Image: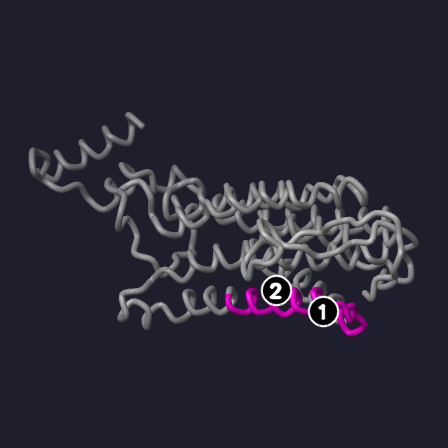
Amino acid sequence: MFWFHSSCASSQVVNGSFGAGEEYTDECLQILHGTGTMSGVFAYESSEVDWCEDNYKHSENVVEYFNTMSSFVFFVVSPIMLYLFHPYARERNLAVHLVWFMMIFVGLFSVYFHMTLSYVGQLLDEISILWVLAIGYALWFPRRHFPFFVKDRSSFSRMVLVITVVTTLSSFIKPTANAYALNCFAIHILYSLGLQMRSCTDRRAVRLAQVSVGLWVLAIACWVSDRFGCGVWQKLNFCYLHGIWHILIVVATAYGSTLIAFLDASYEIPHSLPNLQYWPRDNWVLGLPYIALQGSPKTHKRC
C-alpha cells in the first residue's frame, strides 16, 4: 500500500499539482479506495452487477445501504425455521437442517456483496443460493421421479452433489454457469411440485402452495423490475425493489420449503401424521408455516 501512495504522490509532483487542496487522478483515487487493479476481485465495485439503489447514499463504507440492511432478514427467519423444522427433521433426516443453515450463509454473503459490490461477493452470494437449492433438491425430490438409473436416495444425493461441485468450480471460470444451474434447479423443482400438487386435496397444502407461488412471483417481479426497469424507479425516487426482493424471497422460501417438506413427510413418514400449522399462532392470517407431527396413524393423508 505504501508503494501505491508513493506512486500517486510522485505522479502529482511530476505533474506539478501535488499539494494541499489538489485532487488526485482517477487512477490514484481508485487505488486509495481499494478499487485499483491490484485489489482485483475483492475490490469495492469490482462486480459488473450494480443494482438500482444509489451507491454510498447513506454510508461511505456501504455501497448499497438498503440492500445490505434488508439482507439481515435471513438472520431473523432462518433460526426460527431451524427451530420449527426440528421435530420433522428429527423424524425424517437431520440433514434437513442444512437448508436453513445454508440460508444463513446466503444472508451473510448477501450482506457482503451489497456492502462492497465486489466480484467475490457476487460469486459467494450466487454459489450459496445454488447450494441451498441443491441440498433441498437432494433431500426432497420425490423418489418416484428419480431417473431410471438411480435406485435410491443416497445415489441421487451423490449425483446432485457431484453436479453442484462441478458447477461451483465452473463458476470461478465462467460465472454465468451459476445462472444456468440455478434456473435448471428452480424450474425442475417447480415442475415436480406441480405434478405432486395435482393429486393433493389437503386444503391447507393447496392454500400454502398458492401463497408460496404468489410470493415467489412477486419476489421475481421485484428482482426483474429493479434489474431492468431501473430508469422508471429512479424517476419515481424509489430504488429499493431489490431489498424488497430479499424480504419476499426469504418468506417465499419458508413457505415453499415447508410445503415441499410436508409432501415429503406425507409419502416418506406417513405414520407421523404430518399436519401444517403456523407460527406464532395457527389462527393468524400471517405467520411462518411448519409441520406438526401428530403421532400414531388414525387417518390417511391426502397428499
Q: Which mark is residue 293?
A: none
Label the magenta part by its dominant secondary structure: helix
Q: Nearer the viewer, mark 2 or mark 1?
A: 1
Of 273 and 1, the residue lying toward us: 273
Cα–Cα span, label 2 and label 1: 14 Å
Residue 65 percent location from the top left of the image: 34, 48
* Amino acid tagged 1: Arg
Q: Decide: is 35 above or below 67.
A: above
Q: How is the image coloured?
A: one colour
Residue 158 percent location from the top left of the image: 81, 46
Q: On the picture, is 140 further left or further right than 6?
A: right
Q: Earlier in the sequence, mark 2 or mark 1?
A: 1
**Crowding at label 1, few (<14), some or many (≥20) Cα neighbours within 10 Å?**
few
Of 23 and 157, the residue lying toward us: 157
Toward which corner of the image does residue 38 lie, by quadrant?
Answer: top left
**Crowding at label 2, few (<14), some or many (≥20) Cα neighbours within 10 Å?**
many
Q: Residue at x 86, y 54 (%)?
A: 270
Q: Residue at x 47, y 64 (%)?
A: 223
Q: Which mark is residue 203?
A: 1
Q: Residue at x 78, y 71 (%)?
A: 201
* Amino acid tagged 2: Ser
Of 34 and 129, the residue lying toward us: 129
Toward which corner of the image does residue 91 lie, by quadrant?
Answer: top right
Q: Quadrant of the N terminus?
A: top left
Dot 2: element: helix
Q: Quadrant of the C terminus?
A: bottom right
Part of the protein shown in magenta? 196-218
Residue 124 percent location from the top left of the image: 54, 45
The residue labelled by disc 2 is: 212
Q: On the picture, is 115 further left or further right than 209?
A: left
